[in-house]
């Protein structure tokens, strides 16, 4: 009997060429806009901000008819996710604790004709998370996609090896990076199940795959992202019968506001670039594009996977 194509398989219409290799060179600080390496939000069909020279309109329609909730959406990676998910056809809700940046991003994306809505919320607050999910489902019906992107670096808090990491830093990093995704998933996954299934994407780190090297050996951050990988695999098994796929992305070093201080130092920047065989840092677009793929029907047979998007850094 001839093999028939699986009905869920869609043509992957990415056709993405290599971005310019200078995409992640040191750039000025973004002035608190949280737009990472972009600095602007192009109109639909325009050139992508995270990876210059890439036509993000190649994703047009890939998420048509879907509703997505993205946490930490006002940050460097998060803002690019909001833009790219909307360009792919999704109705996007995003949350952040940064009220001014969230409102600014919402206004910029709406001015570009993209369907987005900002919800101020702290992912460590069960009450705020519950109200956020209720608002999403009440405003636009079904919820199909959750991206747990909200996260913090432990470096400003004094994170380091366990013998040096303050208890306050440990608790705060795990509260945002691990308890936050648990809380949002707790309230959002039932909504995704009611919609007939969908996708959950956790943003982890390549530090959780190989361990961070000095001087960036932040153990609280590493533990939080490792826990997120374990949560990804556990959720993938538990919710597969409900047609909910759960995957994680493990970024390497990304040119975003979280790394702005390191990228201003030429020596530190060169050392970070040298950790990546592809010879550059990642961009917010790199991470957002991977998330769009995992959220789409093109990844309909993928669950429980940790996708490294790190320029080969874990292959040394």
Image (spheres, grey):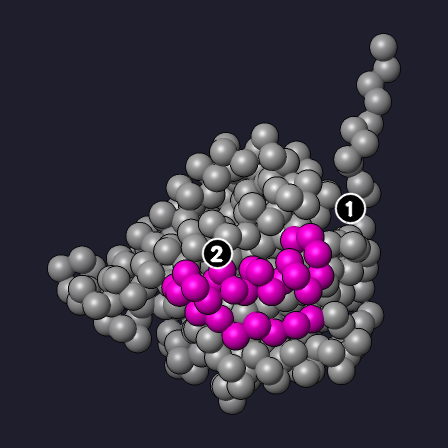
Q: Residues within 10 Å of mark 1 (few under 14, many from 20)?
A: some
What's the residue at 23%, 71% (across, down)? Answer: 158
Q: Is residue 119 left or right of residue 161?
A: right
Between disc 1 and disc 2, the foreground one is 2
Discs 1, 2 touching: Cβ within 8 Å: no
Q: Is residue 1 left or right of residue 156?
A: right
- Mark 1 lies on a secondary structure that is loop
**Where is mark 1, residue-wise?**
12
> In the rendered view of the protein, which quadrant contains the N terminus?
top right
Camera-side residue of 160 and 104: 104
Q: Residues within 10 Å of mark 2 (few under 14, many from 20)?
A: many
Q: Position of residue 39 (x, y in %)?
A: 62, 83
Compared to residue 94, the image places residue 181 above or below, namely above
In which image quadrant can residue 283 be found? Answer: bottom right
- Mark 2 lies on a secondary structure that is helix
Compared to residue 119, the image places residue 176 above or below, namely above
Q: Position of residue 173 (x, y in %)?
A: 32, 63
**Where is mark 2, residue-wise?**
184
For residue 132: magenta? yes
Confirm whether residue 112 shows in the render. Answer: yes
Q: Position of residue 218 (x, y in %)?
A: 28, 62
Q: Position of residue 17 (x, y in %)?
A: 74, 58
Q: Magenta segment, which residues?
A: 116-143
What's the residue at 73%, 43% (across, down)? Answer: 297
């Amino acid at each position: 009997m001839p093999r028939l194509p699986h009905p869920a398989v869609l043509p992957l219409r990415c056709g993405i060429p290599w971005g310019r290799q200078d995409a992640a060179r040191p750039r000025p600080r973004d002035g608190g806009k949280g737009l990472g390496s972009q600095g602007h939000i192009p109109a639909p069909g325009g050139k992508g901000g995270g990876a210059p020279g890439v036509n993000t309109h190649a994703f047009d329609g890939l998420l048509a008819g879907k509703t997505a909730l993205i946490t930490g959406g006002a940050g460097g990676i998060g803002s690019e996710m909001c833009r790219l998910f909307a360009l792919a056809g999704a109705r996007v809700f995003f949350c952040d604790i940064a009220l001014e940046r969230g409102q600014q991003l919402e206004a910029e994306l709406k001015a570009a004709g993209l369907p987005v809505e900002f919800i101020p919320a702290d992912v460590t607050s069960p009450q705020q998370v519950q109200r956020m999910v209720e608002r999403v489902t009440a405003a636009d019906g079904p919820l199909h996609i959750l991206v747990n992107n909200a996260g913090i670096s432990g470096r400003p808090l004094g994170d380091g090896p366990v013998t040096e990491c303050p208890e306050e830093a440990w608790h705060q990093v795990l509260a945002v990076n691990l308890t936050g995704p648990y809380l949002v998933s707790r309230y959002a996954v039932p909504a995704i199940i009611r919609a007939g299934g969908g996708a959950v994407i956790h943003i982890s780190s390549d530090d959780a795959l190989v361990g961070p090297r000095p001087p960036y050996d932040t153990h609280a951050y590493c533990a939080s992202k490792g826990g997120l990988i374990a949560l990804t695999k556990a959720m993938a098994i538990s919710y597969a019968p409900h047609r909910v796929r759960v995957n994680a992305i493990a970024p390497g070093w990304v040119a975003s506001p979280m790394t702005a201080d390191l990228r201003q130092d030429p020596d530190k920047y060169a050392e970070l670039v040298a950790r990546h065989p592809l010879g550059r840092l990642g961009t917010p677009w790199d991470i957002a594009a991977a998330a769009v793929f995992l959220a789409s029907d093109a990844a309909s047979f993928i669950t429980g996977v940790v996708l490294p998007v790190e320029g080969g850094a874990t292959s040394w």
